[in-house]
Amino acid sequence: GENVEQHPSTLSVQEGDSAVIKCTYSDSASNYFPWYKQELGKRPQLIIDIRSNVGEKKDQRIAVTLNKTAKHFSLHITETQPEDSAVYFCAAMEGGYQKVTFGIGTKLQVIP
Amino acid sequence: DVKVTQSSRYLVKRTGEKVFLECVQDMDHENMFWYRQDPGLGLRLIYFSYDVKMKEKGDIPEGYSVSREKKERFSLILESASTNQTSMYLCASSKPANANYGYTFGSGTRLTVV
């Protein structure tokens, strides 16, 4: 089955700096890579996703890149703000029934 | 506008009890999932269902079963609760397999087994 590794497990940045979270996956058949943000005490929410036929996708301050050859994908947050503080999960989805395997999460702290 | 509803936010049960966790979605999604979330382990898939009365084992199905009698409802059953099943349980739903859409999660049920 799929295995997703995520790092770092914790990340502290100053407000206004950029944050990068990296993930690797093992199954070359995975074709969809969502990212979720989970604020303290709340449910995970989808913030951005990328499909295997795309190398990069951007939505305002958030961008995701995918390197299929190396099986790497990354989340980039620019101009970080205190409200970006949360746990971020990367995930990889195999085809078929949309079974998603998650990374262990990265706790991002943005220091004002 | 809550779209995936889990019946309990907090639950305390005794060892050996049979426990039912309920999840209802109002988005007419075909796929439904149960995950457990533990610190340092992320979200691990217990069971999923892609259609009524259909179920598939996830990565950690031992000690759990599921029921999906109606499209909108997916129940997780702990046959005989044990302390190592103390965890946060998250239900999620998604559109059909050929659509590659993200999940919508419920708010979670924090289960404590004593």
Image (cartoon, rainbow, N blue to C red):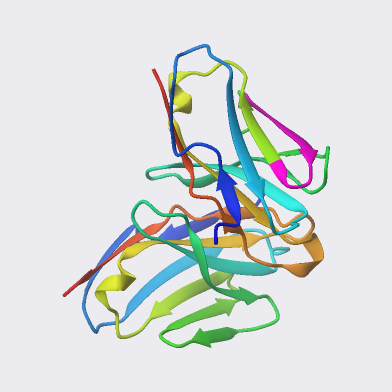
Q: Residue B2: x percent and y percent? A: 55, 57
Q: Residue B77: x percent and y percent? A: 63, 27
Q: Residue B32: x percent and y percent? A: 69, 48
Image vertical order of residue A28 relative to residue B91, above or below: below
The residue lying at 61 percent from left, 76 percent from top is: A50
- Can I make out residue B62 in this image? no
Total labels drawn? 0
Query: In the image shown, does A69 or B113 lie closer to the viewer?
Result: B113
Image vertical order of residue A109 relative to residue B69, above or below: below
The part of the image, by quadrant, that contains residue A6 is bottom left
The part of the image, by quadrant, that contains residue A38 is bottom left
User: Outermost residue, top direction?
Assistant: B16
The part of the image, by quadrant, that contains residue B19 is top right
The residue lying at 47 percent from left, 13 percent from top is: B15
Image vertical order of residue B14 relative to residue A93, above or below: above
| Residue B83 belongs to magenta span | no
User: Outermost residue, left direction?
Assistant: A112
Location of the C terminus of chain A by quadrant is bottom left
| Dominant secondary structure, magenta | strand
Which stretch appears magenta? B64-73
Query: In the image shown, does B54 or A72 lie closer to the viewer?
Result: B54
The residue lying at 33 percent from left, 72 percent from top is: A84
The residue lying at 74 percent from left, 57 percent from top is: B29
Q: Residue A19: x percent and y percent? A: 33, 76
